Each structure stands twice: as C-alpha cells, then as structure tokens.
Image (cartoon, rainbow, N blue to C red):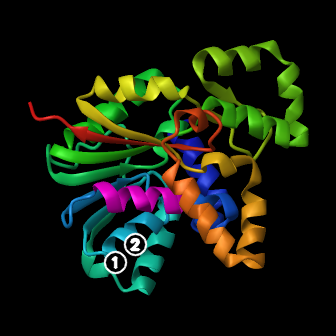
Amino acid sequence: MSQESVRNYYAAFDESEWQRLTWPEGVIEFAVTTRAFDKYLPPHGRVLDIGGGPGRYSIWLAQRGYAVVLADLSPNLLDIARVKIAEAGVQSQVEEVVVCDACDLSRFATASFDAVLCLGPFYHLIDPADRERAATELVRVLKPQSMAFVAFMPLYTFLRRTLALKDERRHLAQPDFVARLMNEGVFLNDVPDRFNAGYGVRPQEVAPFMERRGLKTIELLADTGFAAPHVQHLAELAESNPHAYERAMDIIVSTANDPSLLGASIHLLYVGQKQAR
C-alpha cells in the first residue's frame, strides 16, 4: 500500500484499530506478544514502537517503566494514542508521539534504542525495496545486543481472508491474483474500502531476511497459534469456563514457536537480537 492508502485505510478504521486487541484474535496476539516482551526485553530502557498506531503496546511498555517513542504513519491513530496515553497516566514515560515512515527513521540517531517494535509496517510494504529500507532502518537505530520484535503476515492469511469474504472470493478464480500472491507474496484487492494491498511471507523466509540485516534470530512465533481458525470459540470458552480458557491460553503461548503452526497463524512475530560489529 502507498503511504496515502495506508493513511486513508486507518483513517476509516481508526477507533476499531484501538479496539482490535480486545477482539478474540487480538487478545491472543496481545498475550503472545507481551509474553515475548517479558521474556526478551531488558528490565529498563528506551523503546521505539514504529507502526504502533493507537498505542496499545506503547502504553503497556510505559506502564512497566520503559521510555517509549511511538511513531506511526497515520496521524489519526496517533491522535487516539495521545488521548489513550493521557487516560493511562503514562505521559511522563512517553518521550514522543510522532508521524514517521518505517522506511525512513532518519530523525532517530544510530544505536539509540534498547529495543525496537515494528508490529505492522511490513505487511503493508509490497515493494521489496521498501522492505529492505524498513529492515535496515530498524536495525540501524537499535543498539548492539538489543532486541527487535517484528510482525509479518503469512501469505496464507490473505488466502483465508479472501475465502472468508463473499465479495472477494471471485479473486480465487483469477490466475493473476493467485500467482502474484503465491509467487511474490503480494495481495492486491479491488474491493473499495478494504485492505487493498499487502505483503505475505512464507515463514521460512523471515529469519534469513532479517539475518541479512545483522540480526540473530531468537524466535519466530505464531501469534494465534493453533487457535487461528477458532478464536471465537476461545472467546466463548472465556465466558463459559474461565479456568479452561486460561489453560488454553497457556498452551497457545507455550507452543507459539512450533514450526508446524507458523504458516497457519494470522500474524508472525519475529524476535531477533542485533549483533555487535
């Protein structure tokens, strides 16, 4: 998606983007992701949340004492973030909330962050050159030995959403649509007011791509695990049997790095450590 397309997309769905991590699949994503933060973040430090939108993760980090810089391409989402940050009472921990492109982090000094989150931009970058720039930039601003958390979308997520949406199913009969997605990972959608362009990966491509930029792969996680097709059932379980729900969530989190689950997840979370030069 172009920068303007991304801005327009999130301008139309800005408040729902804040709510997204309270939806059934979002609750699982949030649990897997924050568990990874607990496991791999240093006890304190300065964190860049690039593509952090309305600030859910930034607020979580600020509440735990991290100094946070929240950056996103969407002014609408950042307006929401400023309100939510104030409501959470963590303004003193948030250094800056700024419009910024993940492909150009030149406003930030080299090796100036103790961790970088990039939990959204990569599946909007259909141009390989943009993905190269974004990966290079996030590694540049990261201190040596520090951690990067990067979200990707498996290409099968795009096939699954196409099958799920009645007015998009016709794309499956279009050879160019299928070939482009399967061969290049590029999803293009002509239905108005929808996610109209995205990039999906095969899980085995992620680690080599990030390692070429100077990261050591620590983990690759399926953020919805085995529950990807059944997130609504999990939400129902939370109501009917909270103990079973908590146990199911523990299993999802503890098995999120199972390679057999990665391609079927809704998102992937890459965890890597910057190597010293």
Residue 222: x percent and y percent? 54, 44
Is residue 167 positioned above or below 9 on the image? above
Q: Please name the amino acid that badge 2 sits on.
A: Ile
Tell whether position 37 is magenta. yes
Q: Which residues are magenta?
A: 29-40
Residue 155: x percent and y percent? 63, 30
Q: On the image, numbered disc 2 is attached to which residue?
A: 59
Do labels 1 and 2 touch, CB within 8 Å? yes
Q: Nearer the viewer, residue 82 or 162?
A: 162
Q: Nearer the viewer, residue 136 or 163?
A: 163
Is residue 250 positioned above or below 188 on the image? below
In the displayed structure image, the side of residue 110 where residue 81 appears, left or right: right
Residue 210 appears in the picture as rendered: yes
Q: Please name the amino acid that badge 1 sits on.
A: Gln
Seen at 35% across and 59% down, the residue is: 37
In the displayed structure image, the side of residue 40 where residue 179 appears, left or right: right
Seen at 71% across and 14% down, the residue is: 179
Q: Quadrant of the C terminus?
A: top left
Q: Secondary structure at mark 1?
A: helix
Residue 9: x percent and y percent? 63, 50
Residue 55: x percent and y percent? 45, 66
Q: Quadrant of the N terminus?
A: top right
Seen at 44% across and 29% down, the residue is: 206
